[in-house]
Each structure stands twice: as structure tokens, then as C-alpha cells.
Image (cartoon, rainbow, N blue to C red):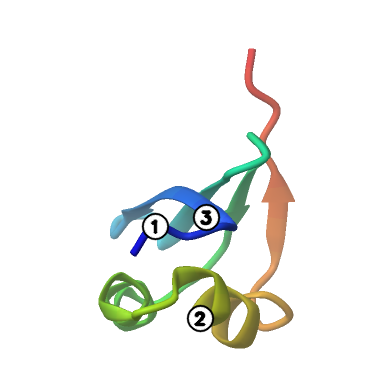
Amino acid sequence: MPSSVVSKFHYNADTEILRVIYVSGMVYDYLNVPEEKYLAMKAAFSKGTFLNQQIKGNYEFRKVELL
């Protein structure tokens, strides 16, 4: 089922950065996210719900300015 919030997300295991591309076009990097959290998000039925409950507020983030 497509998410109404999350367009795409990618994970870099070396840096533990979870990059989330929102449907709105905004891009955020969530820092120091364990690979287990990424795998759980990947398996979650609702990516947006998982993001809101498990990632936001639990990990530092930065907005990515795309050129």
C-alpha cells in the first residue's frame, strides 16, 4: 500500500543515516538510526505510522537541501 506521507526512504549502514523523502518533496536525514529500525520500517505495513511512532522524536535529524 503506498504511503500518503513517505515517498521513498534509503538507509546507509556505514553512517547509520535513514534518509526519508516525503510525498511533499521534503528530504530529511535521521541520524544514528540502527539498522534494525530501518529493517523494521521496511517491513512495516504503514511507513508513515512507523516513522511517526518510532523515528520522529527518537533520533536527531537534519533537513537536506537539494541543489
In this rendering, which labeled residue sits more in front, label 2 or label 1?
Answer: 1
Q: Which residue is mark 2?
A: 50
Left or right: 65, with 43 as reference point: right
Residue in the image at 35% along x and 72% along y:
38
* Gap between marks 2 and 1 measured at Cα: 14 Å
Sequence-first tag of 2 and 3: 3
Residue at 44 percent of width and 76 percent of height: 46
In this rendering, which labeled residue sits more in front, label 3 or label 1? 1
Q: Which quarter of the figure is the C terminus placed in?
A: top right
Q: Which residue is mark 3?
A: 6
Identified by mark 2, the residue type is Phe
User: Where residue 23 sits in the image (x, y, percent)?
Assistant: 59, 44
The quarter of the rendered structure image containing the N terminus is: bottom left
Q: Is residue 5 left or right of residue 24?
A: left
**Residue 42: quadrant of the picture:** bottom left
Question: Which disc is residue 2 wearing?
Answer: 1
Separation of marks 2 and 3 at Cα, in angstroms? 10 Å
- Residue 54, x across and y down, in percent: 56, 85
Residue 18 percent across, percent down from the top left: 46, 58
Q: Nearer the viewer, residue 26 or 32?
A: 26
**Amino acid type for the residue under numbered disc 1:** Pro
Q: Are marks 2 and 3 in contact (CB under 8 Å)?
A: no
Q: Is residue 37 above or below residue 5?
A: below
* Tag shown at residue 62: none
- Dot 3: element: strand
The percent position of residue 30, horizontal first and vertical second, equals 58, 61
Q: Judge from the rendering whether residue 20 lies leftward or rightward of residue 35; answer left or right.
A: right
**Dot 3 amino acid type:** Val
**Which class describes the residues within 10 Å of circle 2: few (<14), some (14-19), or many (20+)?**
some
* Residue at 70% across, 27% down: 65
